[in-house]
Amino acid sequence: REKLLAEAAHLARYARKLSPNDLDALAVVAEIADERGQVAEAIEASIASIAITGPEKALPTITGRLGALYYRTGQLDNAIRWLRIAEAANAEGAPIIVLAHALAVRGEMPSAIEALLGALPVNRAYSVDNAMLAFALAVHLDRDEQPGAVFDVLDPLSRSLQQGYPAT
């Protein structure tokens, strides 16, 4: 796997060298660097992409990844900033979960729960991303000592999982 990732990284860097303002090349460089644990390179490629589009027009996958990278490096303020931008751009799944964790670490549990609640669909159709959001919400509600609310989240999720995931 590492050999394939190294080859992909080489190709992605070459594509970036050929076209330094290509958003797709930057996104691929960031994704592969993140997969390989090369956080500095992933952050640099993400920032380069955002510099081209501007934060308000950047894809939530880019801003969400950047926020997650900052979270993993312990830079909570930067993490929350970029994850909030991803949230505003309707990011789904992992960036919202990382945002909730970052807010909880900062001691803002009500904001963490609000972020997760806001990301769950009203009809509670549980795709894989929505199931992850529901589990994260249940964990945060439990940490906030709201056992009744935990049951309210997990019971419909349990029934949904027994029926299987809808096609996505």
Image: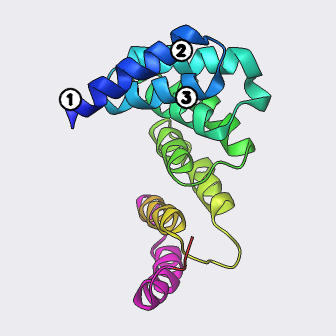
Residue 73 locus on image (x, y percent): 38, 23
Residue, x 46% and y 45% (percent of image)?
101
Give, as a three-letter code, the residue at label 3: Ala
At mark 1, the secondary structure is: helix
How far, Cα to Cα, is label 2 from label 1?
A: 20 Å
* 158 relative position to 22: left or right: left
At mark 2, the secondary structure is: helix
How far, Cα to Cα, is label 2 from label 3?
A: 10 Å
Which mark, residue 27? 3
Label 1 neighbour load within 10 Å: few <14, some 14-19, many 20+:
few
Whether 18 is among the magenta residues is no
Give, as a three-letter code, the residue at label 1: Lys
Does label 2 or label 1 sit earlier along the sequence? 1
Residue, x 62% and y 30% (percent of image)?
82
Residues tagged 3 and 1 counted as in contact (Cβ below 8 A): no
Q: Which residue is mark 1?
A: 3
Residue, x 65% and y 56% (percent of image)?
114
Q: What span is colored magenta in the figure?
A: 143-165
Q: Which residue is mark 2?
A: 16
Give, as a three-letter code, the residue at label 2: Arg
Residues tagged 2 and 1 counted as in contact (Cβ below 8 A): no
Residue 64 locus on image (x, y percent): 57, 37
Residue 81 locus on image (x, y percent): 63, 28
Does label 2 or label 3 sit earlier along the sequence? 2
